Image: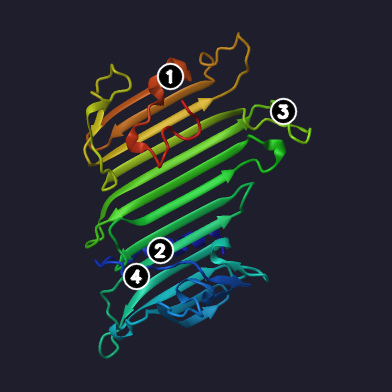
Amino acid sequence: MSKGFQLATLAGALSLAMSGSVLAIDFDYGGWTATNGDIDETTGGMCQSGLANPLYTCSVVASGKGFKQINVTEVGDASSGVSYIMTIVTDQNAGGATGASADALGFADVSFVKMKLTLGGTPDATLSGITAKQVIRDGTGTGKPFESTTNINTGWANTAGSNIVVSQNLSDDGGTPGFAGDNFISNFTYSGDNDVDTGVSTGFEMSIDQSAGLASGQTITDGNGNTVTDPSINDIQVFALREKKGSKLTAAKVGSPIDLDGTGPQPGVTWAANEDIKAIWIGQEINLGTSADVNQGSLGSSFGYVSFQNVDAETTTSAFGFSETNSSSAWVWDDAFYVGTETTPPGIAP
């Protein structure tokens, strides 16, 4: 199954109609295993067998190589007529002869749709929507691992918070000691909120990070007495973008605007909660050697650029400079754009 088709499998679900509801149960997209494409849902997750007090009853609706549909009903809720069709799609030979768990497969697409039969057996057409998770992996560990994860909740599955989450990560770390320090890393994440009742988008948060590193060529002697490239002395370029809008921007910045140039026509950038703000940061460090005659900044080997923009207010401020010493403002990275414990853009510390 091609990666383009795999991505389209879940992307098509976004076109489903949205209707307001609240996600009632905790859906588990994993726990199952596959052997030569045969899916076994009883090894774990919602349909795990052998439990003293199972939360769900499961019955197979249809199955084939790399495909299975299961009717899942919450224990004690059978009288309501509500059940969920769990659809699992993976590669036709997934797991090979030895078998593998869902979280170790190269491709897995799991979705739940809600069903409710009224008196007389007529389907309730108002319960449109889906909750789904798709994972695509290519390679693990060193080398060129790629992973793409997409989660969506629409219609009856729409909840308060992020209902569309997309994450893609590619890391090429050189793979062999001879290329230590050569690397390319690209990360993309998107998290979108929707109104619980209407399904209308209320905000999103997006981040893009890319870094390319090239070993300097300087060598060291490793613990085994071998001469190898020093992976700690790199040339590197880094790009980072952050954008927050609407419900994802909960804190305002007023009173102390970000004013990077101090002389431009704009009075700096501030924002109120729920506005749309964007930041871009670019940095480069190139090691030209340690000679006293080498001026790193004047040769353009090291530079930094940063810009902040309030998209709604149409205000922008930016700064560019060579070397960290000559342009400290070019390393500003406001608190609103921190990720976790991150206090500077990834890749280059100011």
Left or right relative to 117: residue 5: right
Instruction: Give the residue number, with chain letter if any, for mark 1.
Output: 321
* Circle nearer the N terminus (4, 1): 4
* Circle nearer the N terminus (1, 3): 3
The residue tagged with tag 3: helix, strand or loop? strand
Three-letter code, disc 2: Gly
Instruction: Give the residue number, with chain letter if any, for mark 2.
Output: 12
Mark seen at residue 220: 3
* Circle nearer the N terminus (2, 3): 2
The residue tagged with tag 1: helix, strand or loop? strand
Residue furthest right as drawn: 225
The residue tagged with tag 4: helix, strand or loop? loop
Instruction: Give the residue number, with chain letter if any, for mark 4.
Output: 25
Q: CA distance from mark 1 to mark 3?
A: 33 Å
- Is 65 located above or below residue 280 in the figure? below
Residue at x-position 56% and y-position 56%: 137
